Amino acid sequence: MGEMDKTLSGVDLAYRILKERKTDLYFRDLLTEVVTAKMVPSYLMKQAMAELHTQINMDSRFTFKGKGYWGLTEWVPVQRTAGRPEESVSAVLDETVEIRRTKLQEIQQPDEPETGFTGDNDDSSQEE
């Protein structure tokens, strides 16, 4: 990795590492390479790794391969179905990004539990 690597964002550096290796990497190994190349101080390591994990999850260039391994979406062939017209790779990637964003928003802002409690102090429904 060269001098320019310090100016790249962590997620762009992760992309570059995978692109150069041309193979899936175990997530912790990928994170370690990125934070080492960026010279992240040890006291910020956990925070940097958590941020990078979130960024990779939201970035449509990456795809989870299972068992902790990540690769690049461009390595996965686009599946075509008889019922769908030909789509560009960018349209499929855009759809993937939107699905990931929706899931992340659901995790960050879960729906209110259905307990029947509305927070109002409506005494008219209580029996005396």
Image (cartoon, grey):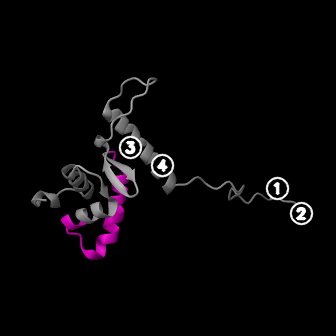
Nearest to the observer: residue 15 or residue 111: 15
Nearest to the observer: residue 93 or residue 117: 93
In space, the residues marked 3 and 2 are separated at their CA atoms by 53 Å
**SS for callout 4:** helix
Q: State whether residue 41 is above or below residue 124.
A: below
User: Where residue 12 sits: x, y (%)?
Assistant: 23, 53
Q: Looking at the image, tell me whether mark 2 or mark 4 is earlier in sequence order.
A: 4
Q: Of the numbered discs in the image, which one, if any, rests on residue 124? A: 1
- Residue type highlighted by circle 2: Glu
Q: Which residue is mark 4?
A: 103
Identify which residue is drawn at 40% across, 23% down.
Answer: 85
- Residue type highlighted by circle 3: Val
Q: Of the numbered discs in the image, which one, if any, rests on residue 97? A: 3
**SS for callout 3:** helix
Image quadrant assignment for residue 51: bottom left
Magenta residue check for 41: yes
In space, the residues marked 2 and 4 are separated at their CA atoms by 44 Å
